[in-house]
Image: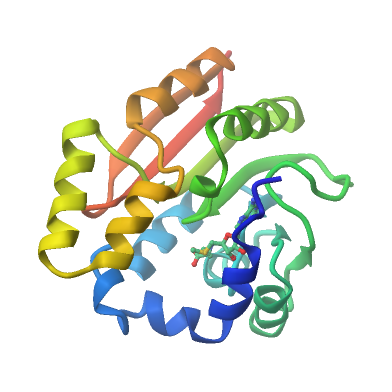
């Protein structure tokens, strides 16, 4: 579910690491501080970790470097091929945020970077509900993704992108399913999580949700 973008990611896989490294001027601000952001998330994760949308395994690698166990899930075959070469320490399966292989160990952290926005709101809720049921009692969801503080901020980001001639970015901001902070907060709270948000750059936020008492 929510994997209508997989063809695009198959095509993007071979140049993905260049994009996050700043090669595409349109997306430089989206990925500003990419390595540091992923490192912050990796430091917070508790083993065993379940990661969705691993892409080329940049976050995966930072987590396994801390001797934490990672089970990865990634729908794009081309991304998986690169991830397996870059991070053979992790077990990376075909699947998505909602449909993934059965877990054979208790999971303490569910993590993801720059991927959750591929799900529509109803799919986000379904995924987060499943995670609540699957996580250990002290478990947590830790995501990094673009989200909008409010409607005015969204319009400002779109306007900025248009003014800079970043028309692909402007289109993404309008067409992908980036959530509003308040809607996402409500979703987590209604499902029983405690949640906090921290802005990391102009677009990206760290979302940290713990299973409530
Ligand atoms: C922008 S990349 C992020 C990759 C990596 N996490 C990172 O931080 O660089 C988004 C990734 O999410 C994957 N993806 C797309 N739809 C997905 C879904 N429904 N479930 C899980 N992953 C998905 C894509 O194939 C792609 O690898």
Asked if one can make out residue 45 in the rendered structure from this viewpoint, the answer is no
* Quarter of the image where one finds residue 168: bottom left
Query: Camera-side residue: 147 or 89?
Result: 147
Position of 205 with respect to 65 (left or right) is: left
Query: Which residue is rendered at x = 89% and y = 47% of the image?
Result: 104
Position of 201 with respect to 43 (left or right) is: left
Position of 174 with respect to 39 (left or right) is: left
Asked if one can make out residue 175 in the rendered structure from this viewpoint, the answer is yes
Query: Which residue is rendered at x = 12% and y = 68% of the image?
Result: 164
What is the x, y in percent for residue 45?
A: 55, 49
- The structure's colour scheme is rainbow
Count of all numbered marks drawn on residues in the image? 0
Query: Which residue is rendered at x = 13% and y = 56% of the image?
Result: 160
What is the x, y in percent for residue 175?
A: 41, 49
**Location of residue 5 with respect to 178 vertically, above or below:** below
What is the x, y in percent for residue 11?
A: 59, 79
**Location of residue 22 with respect to 107 vertically, above or below:** below
**Location of residue 97 with respect to 129 vertically, above or below:** below
Image quadrant occupied by the N terminus: top right
Image quadrant occupied by the C terminus: top right
Answer with the quadrant where ligand 1 appears in the image.
Answer: bottom right
Residue extending farthest to the left is 163
Position of 18 with respect to 129 (left or right) is: left
* Quarter of the image where one finds residue 207: top left
Query: Which residue is rendered at x = 27% and y = 58% of the image?
Result: 170
């Amino acid at each position: 579910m929510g994997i209508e973008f997989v063809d695009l990611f198959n095509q993007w896989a071979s140049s993905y690491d260049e994009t996050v490294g700043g090669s595409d001027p349109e997306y430089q601000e989206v990925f500003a501080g990419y390595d540091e952001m992923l490192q912050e998330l990796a430091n917070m994760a508790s083993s065993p970790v379940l990661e969705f949308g691993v892409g080329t395994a940049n976050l995966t690698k930072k987590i396994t470097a801390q001797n934490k166990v990672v089970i990865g899930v990634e729908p794009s075959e081309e991304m998986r091929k690169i991830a397996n070469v870059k991070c053979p320490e992790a077990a990376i399966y075909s699947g998505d945020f909602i449909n993934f292989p059965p877990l054979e160990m208790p999971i303490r952290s569910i993590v993801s970077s720059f991927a959750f926005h591929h799900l529509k709101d109803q799919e986000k809720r379904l995924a987060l509900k499943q995670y609540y049921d699957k996580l250990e009692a002290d478990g947590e969801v830790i995501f990094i993704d673009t989200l909008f503080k409010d409607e005015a901020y969204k319009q400002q980001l779109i306007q900025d992108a248009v003014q800079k001639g970043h028309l692909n970015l402007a289109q993404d901001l309008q067409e992908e399913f980036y959530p509003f902070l308040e809607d996402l907060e409500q979703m987590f709270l209604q499902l029983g999580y405690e949640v906090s948000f921290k802005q990391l750059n102009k677009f990206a936020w760290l979302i940290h949700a713990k299973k409530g008492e």
